[in-house]
Amino acid sequence: MKELHTGRLYWPGTVGSTLEQPALKQNIKTDVAVIGGGMSGTICSHVFLQSGLSVAMLERGQIAGGSTSANTGMLQFCNDIMLCDLIDQIGQSDAVAFYRACKHAVDRIESTANLLDRGVDFKRKSSLYYASSEQDLPKLKKEYETLRRHGFDVEFWDADKIATHFPFRKPGAIVTHGDAAINPYKFVSTLAKHAVDAGLMAYEQTDIVEHRMHDNGYHVLLTADGFEVEAKHVVYAIGYEPEELRGKLIKANLKRSFVIVTGAEPNLTDWHEHFFIWETARPYLYMRTDNYNRAFVGGMDEDIEQPLHGAQAQRKHSQKLYERLRSLFPMFEAPVEYEWNATFGESCDNLPFIGEDPAWPNVFYCLGYGGNGSVYSMIAADLLRDLIKGVPNGLAPIVALDRQSLSQVQ
């Protein structure tokens, strides 16, 4: 099993008990087999089940135990690529449609969270996206005008207004409204239980080692224990591309990123409305708080796929992140209590890969490259449901695995 993160994670300790499902010990048949029990797999399974499909979710480890545990729980409709740049890349109509889909996905996650019988710490937030330097300011203003022109709820704050609301000055910032925070581990584990209660067949410790197709069009998945899953449709919801696709189709970059979580800070009055904070520099620093006044700080991305080992090496990165936090909030005194680093992926055009395998009928992928993985999971669930049920979806060609725009950036 590929190692996705190392260090001391925060989210698993916030849940007293989690859903435990058996390993698959018999042959089964289903409409859709979803491979992966993280954010993507669980949301997809829930949405498919709601649409009347029978679903089996197959997780080789523990549900919510992979990248979900290292997710920082920031749900934003803005992306790593600015809307104005995405318009240049794929055209205005498609770029705006993608951004609106991200906004709608945040709303869909909220409605899903409201279905659950246990709180998942969903809370609406605004974001401060600041210019890291004076040189970034003209581009940031262009992005603000683009977002505003297309109906997104945004403001532009100059340096004086930023300093009025925060203990730091920056050349300027876009404030976006309509984002949200969530506890990703609570959300996935609680949603999985909700789906199981509604009829989802969920299996943990079930590793798929072979995938073949029958002459009748059905797909057969073989587990490491020798059992078979027969399905009309197969969805790979595993975060990043399967090994068999590596380098053949997607051409994405895997990196590692670092996160710290502090203890509770008693006085956070200078952190205006607990905004999310991020910046124009790349790789960018990002920050958020939770319901207990802990600060989450992430960034310092490195072009290395494997997570970093060694407490001393991790601590050096953590100290740098903490220094960045203190540079913005000098009053912050709570120490670092959790620290980890994790693998994440970026596609060459900054969009996720969602859709049908161009060469394999009824095999679909939900591969959420980029900083908006949780938002992409919800987009994927609705999009793949439509593809499976034969319903047209205008977003499909924008995020397809063989989309035409890839040829312009590869």
Image (cartoon, rainbow, N blue to C red):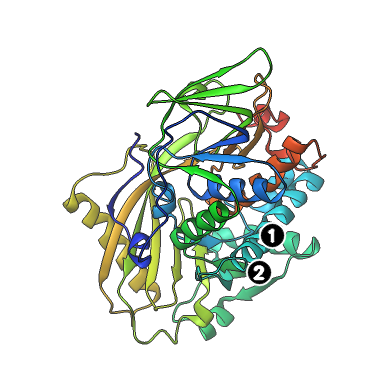
Could one spot residue 370 in this view of the protein? no
The residue that disc 1 covers is 103
The residue that disc 2 covers is 178
Q: Nearer the viewer, residue 284 or 365?
A: 365
Element carrying mark 1: helix
Give the residue type at disc 1: Lys
Distance from Cα at disc 2 to Cα at disc 1: 7 Å
Determine which quarter of the picture holds residue 408: top right
Give the residue type at disc 2: Gly
Q: What is the x, y in percent for residue 254?
A: 44, 37
Locate residue 316 relative to residue 177 in the image: left or right.
left
Residue at image position (59%, 65%) is 113
Could you classify mark 2 by the number of other residues whose Cα lies within 10 Å: few (under 14), some (14-19), or many (20 or more)? Answer: some
Residue at image position (40%, 73%) is 328
Q: What is the x, y in percent for residue 133?
A: 50, 62
Locate residue 222 relative to residue 372 in the image: left or right.
left
The C terminus sits in image quarter: top right
The correct choice, above or below, for 127 with respect to 26 in the image is: below
The correct choice, above or below, for 230 with respect to 345 in the image is: above
Q: Which mark is residue 233?
A: none
Q: What is the x, y in percent for residue 357?
A: 64, 26
Element carrying mark 2: strand
